[in-house]
Amino acid sequence: MPKVLVTGGLGFIGSNFVRRALSARPSWTIVDLDKRTYAGNPANVADLPRSRHRWIKGDICDPKTVDKAMRGCELVVHFAAETHVDRSIHDASAFLRTNVVGTQVLLDAALRLGVRRFLHVSTDEVYGSVPKGFSREGDRLEPNSPYAASKAASDLLVRSYFVTHKAPVLTTRASNNYGPYQYPEKALPLMITNFMEDKPFPMYGDGRQVRDWLHAADHARAILTVLEKGALGEVYNIGGSYTCQNRELIERVLKLMGKPRSLVVPVEDRKGHDRRYALDCGKLLKLGFKHEYDFDKGLRETIAWYRDNERWWRPLKKAGGYRSYYKTQYKGRRPQGVV
Ligand code: NAD
Ligand code: TYD
């Protein structure tokens, strides 16, 4: 019975991974170390069998808690992080603490406890904006937001533990994820849930930024592939199955939901807003990975999920913290022109 430590398994991608892994690997039991920040939600894993999934409430920056959670685990999949770019622009401190120091605490524990494989989950944002072509794993890291800089720092730390300590590490860098259980501050769930309430969606700048969309279930399958077949010390890009400008994404969602364009309000751009992300995934495909989701199917299913699960997202949007955060994001930005 392999015992696996997942960090951040109450979050969006972590909970999708835990769900997938429990069904795809029937012999696994999962210990889920999660601090339950505003983004961590026990409801995301409430349906999972307690006999195979145990949540420990704790901080990855605390060595004692980490040791307790990691003891006896063969494998570690590390998702826990502060993840929202806009929040990192307002205040980067939690990003540096969790994303950098937290990763260092986990790496030290993994060395001490003799973990067999440690997979660090990272992002395409570490490459910065790529005007043309596709980022490859050996490219220079040029992060532009404090969030991306904190993830790049954690990637370099992971690399250093491989070179210095021969730590059994792997790193994955994924593109923009979408799917069920995504906290409604990120672009797609914010758009879907605002449109459901006939509220405007704030489109940053000219809306011509390009993002690559990866379904969280495909991300989970790709992580399993890299965890089991990847070469230690290596980095693997995990791209999605569809790339488009934000404007096109908004148009698609409006059309699928039967909503008017007047719900889209252009606002002042995000500071340092990356224009384009694009990943070369040749290295991952060589491990035998294939996407299951095409974007059209994934987007329809995601919209349907938010329609069917109002009881999941409405309380999140009603919470005081969310409302004051959203005010700074939307009401604090001046509307600019028309779509
Ligand atoms: P999320 O914000 O939805 O969830 C993060 C989880 O980490 C939450 O459950 C939170 O409670 C937990 N957490 C935060 N700080 C913690 C701490 N100090 N100790 C323990 N737990 C803590 O994030 P997500 O979107 O699911 O992202 C998961 C990982 O994937 C992150 O490492 C992120 O950088 C990476 N990633 C995300 C995307 C994306 O599109 N969302 C794309 C590529 C990579
Ligand atoms: P986001 O989901 O924050 O992911 P990331 O910044 O990591 O790519 O945003 C996706 C895109 O949508 C990004 O180009 C910023 C844009 N965006 C908006 O236009 N309006 C919004 O309210 C948000 C949250 C994002």
Image: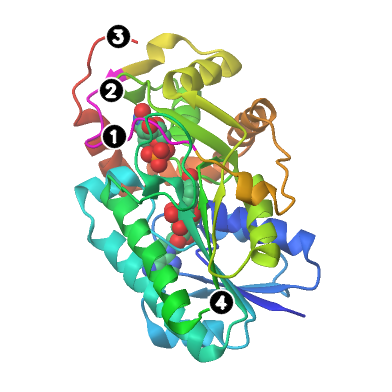
- Residue 227: tell me if it is visible: yes
79 is higher (above) or lower (below) than 253: below
Alpha carbon of mark 2 to alpha carbon of mark 1: how far?
9 Å
Q: Secondary structure at mark 2?
A: loop
Range of the magenta residues? Answer: 266-278
Alpha carbon of mark 4 to alpha carbon of mark 1: how far?
34 Å
Left or right of 170 on screen, residue 184: left
Confirm or reject: label 2 Cβ below 8 Å from ligand 2: yes
Q: Nearer the viewer, mark 2 or mark 3?
A: 2
**Residue 289 location in percent, x, y?**
72, 49
Q: Which mark is residue 264?
A: none
Q: In the rendered structure, which disc, 2 or 1, sits on the residue that comes first in sequence?
A: 2
For label 2, the residue is: 205
Residue 72 within the magenta-colored segment of the rendering: no
Alpha carbon of mark 4 to alpha carbon of mark 2: how far?
42 Å
Q: In the rendered structure, which disc, 2 or 3, sits on the residue that comes first in sequence?
A: 2
Q: In the rendered structure, which disc, 3 or 1, sits on the residue that comes first in sequence?
A: 1
Q: Secondary structure at mark 4?
A: loop
Q: In the rendered structure, which disc, 4 or 3, sits on the residue that comes first in sequence?
A: 4
**Residue 56 location in percent, x, y?**
53, 76
Write down the quadrant of residue 37 in the picture: bottom left
Residue 268 within the magenta-colored segment of the rendering: yes
Q: Residue furthest right?
A: 26
Alpha carbon of mark 4 to alpha carbon of mark 3: how far?
52 Å
143 is higher (above) or lower (below) than 1: above
Residue at (42% x, 49% y) in the render: 139
**Residue 246 location in percent, x, y?**
43, 24
Residue at (51% x, 34% y) in the render: 212
Q: Of the residues shown, which amino acid type is indicated by label 1? A: His
Left or right of 28 on screen, residue 172: left
Alpha carbon of mark 2 to alpha carbon of mark 3: how far?
11 Å
For label 1, the residue is: 273
